[in-house]
Amino acid sequence: MAPAGFAHDALDESSAQKGERYVFSNDELPNLSDPYIGGSKQFSNLREAASIQLTELDGRQNNAADVYAHKGFAYVGTHTANGAEGGVRVFDMKDPENPEEVAVFGHDDVPGAWHEKVIVKSVNTPDFKGDLAVVSVQQLNRNADTSGGTLLYDVTDPHNPEKLGYWETYADTRGTHELYLTTQGNRALLLTSNPYADYYSTTIDAVAEEERRMDFAVVDVSNPAEPETLWEFDPRTLPEVPEDFNGYNWVDEHGKTRAVFNHSVITDNNGQYAYVSMWDLGTLIFDITDPENPEYISRTDYASDQQGAAHSAALARGGNILIETREVSNPVREGFESAYGYTRIFDISDKSNPELLSEFKTDLTYQVEDGTTFANTVHDPKVRGNMLYLSYYAGGVVMVDISDPANPEKIGQYTPEQADVWGVFVDRNYILASDMGQGLKVLQRNNGGGNNGNNGNNGNAHGHTQGR
C-alpha cells in the first residue's frame, strides 16, 4: 500500500525540506528590522538581549534546529541547509547578551547526516558520572552505507565534548528523529523516536522477525559506550491497530486513513512515564517503571474532522497536565477542518483517561489562504511553572499563561523579522529561541540594565515569511 502524504512526514520528504530555508549570515542580521515584542504581566518588559548566527563550519553556513540548555551552556542542533553535517553547537551563556560559541561536536561522526535534537542530563551510573549528551542522527540518504541513530557524548567539560558511543537504528531509515534522556536511580535511559523503522523493516524489506525494528525504543545507556536496546513498541498490540498494519497507514474508527509513526518522546522528571507522539494515533502514555517491560496506559484521540499530527509534548502541574502540539502544515484535506496545527491541553491526573481541557490557537491557525506551509503551525512546547512557551515558526515564540489550563491566555510574543523559530527553552534568567535562518536568540526581561532598544511593539507580529 503506497504511503500518502501527511504534514511533517519524511515519506513525502517534507522533513528534509524543512532545511531548505534562507539562512542569514552574521553580517546580514543587523540589516533586519527590530523584532516584534509584545506582552503583558511578566512579559511587559521583555527584550531581545542577543541574536547570533552559528559560525561557519568548513566553509558551510548551517541552519539552527532545536535548542537545549544545561548548567549555563546552550546546545543548538543543526538541520540540513548546505549539506548538513553541522553537528551540535555549544554556547557559553555566562553573559546572556554575548553568547560565545565554544565547541562543536557530532558533525564528523556520520557523513551526510544532520543533528537536530540534543538532550543533556547529569548522569551517575556505575560506568559513567558526569553530563551526558544524546544527539539525534538522521541521514540525507536513508540508503547510504552508514546508519542513523543516536550519538552519546560526554559534555562534562562543554568546551571539550568527548564521544562515548553510538546507538544505531534500522539501516534503511533516516535514523533517530527526536529523543529523550532520563534516569532511574543509577540507571540512564535513552528513549528514541525512529520514524518508519517499523514501515521499512516489516513492509518494504520484510526482514526476519528477530531483525524487525519499531519506531519507539527504550535503550539502556548506563554505560554510554555500550548502549543496549531493552524494548521496542509494536502498535499492533493495541486493539485499534490491526495485525496487518503496515507500519504507516492506519484506518481509524471513522474509516479515515491516517499516518502513524513515532515523532517524539519525553518523560516526566522521575522517569516513570513516557509520552510518545505517534502522529495520528495521538500521544501515547506508557508506564516505564520497568523499562524492559513498559506498560501501555492510554492515548489522546481526535475528533473525526481533526487532523492528528501529534508532534511534541510537555508536562505541567507535576505531570498532571499534558500539552500536545500538532504540526499540521497542510490545512486543507478533504473530510477535515481547515486549520494549521494548534495546541491541545489535557488533564492526565488519571493517566488511563486523558481529559481534553482546552485548545489554544492563534491568528495563524486559520490563515488557510497561505496554503501548505510550516510557517503557520505550532511546533514545540516547553513549560516553566504556569507558563507555556510555544515555538511557532513565523510566529516566533508565543507565551501562554496556563494557570487555568482550561482557559489558556496568550500574554506574550516575540517575533523576529522573517522569523523561522524552531525551538524554545527556558533557563535561568533567559529564554532561548533557535531560529532556522538566524541562529540563537536570547530574550530577557529588562530590569533597568542593558540595551532596551528592541522592547517596543515594532513590526508585524504575523506578517513575516519563512525566508527570502
Image (tube, helix red, strand yellow):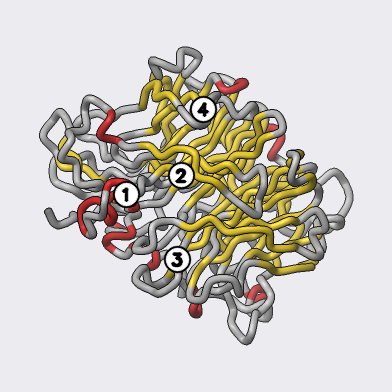
Q: Amino acid at mark 2?
A: Ser
Query: Which label belongs to residue 147?
Result: 3
Position of 321 relative to 92 (above/below)? above
Query: N-terminal of the two: label 1 or label 2?
Result: 1
Q: Residue at x 70, y 29 (%)?
A: 185
- Distance from disc 3 to disc 4, alpha carbons, whole Å, reads 27 Å
Whether residue 119 can be seen here: yes
Q: Amino acid at mark 1?
A: Arg
Of 104 and 398, nearer the camera is 104
Whether residue 421 can be seen here: no
Query: Which label belongs to residue 264?
Result: 2
Q: Is residue 138 left or right of residue 439?
A: left
Q: Amino acid at mark 3?
A: Ser
- Residue with the mark numbered 4: 288
Disc 1: CA contacts within 10 A as few (<14), some (14-19) or many (>=20)? some
Query: Which label belongs to residue 212?
Result: 1
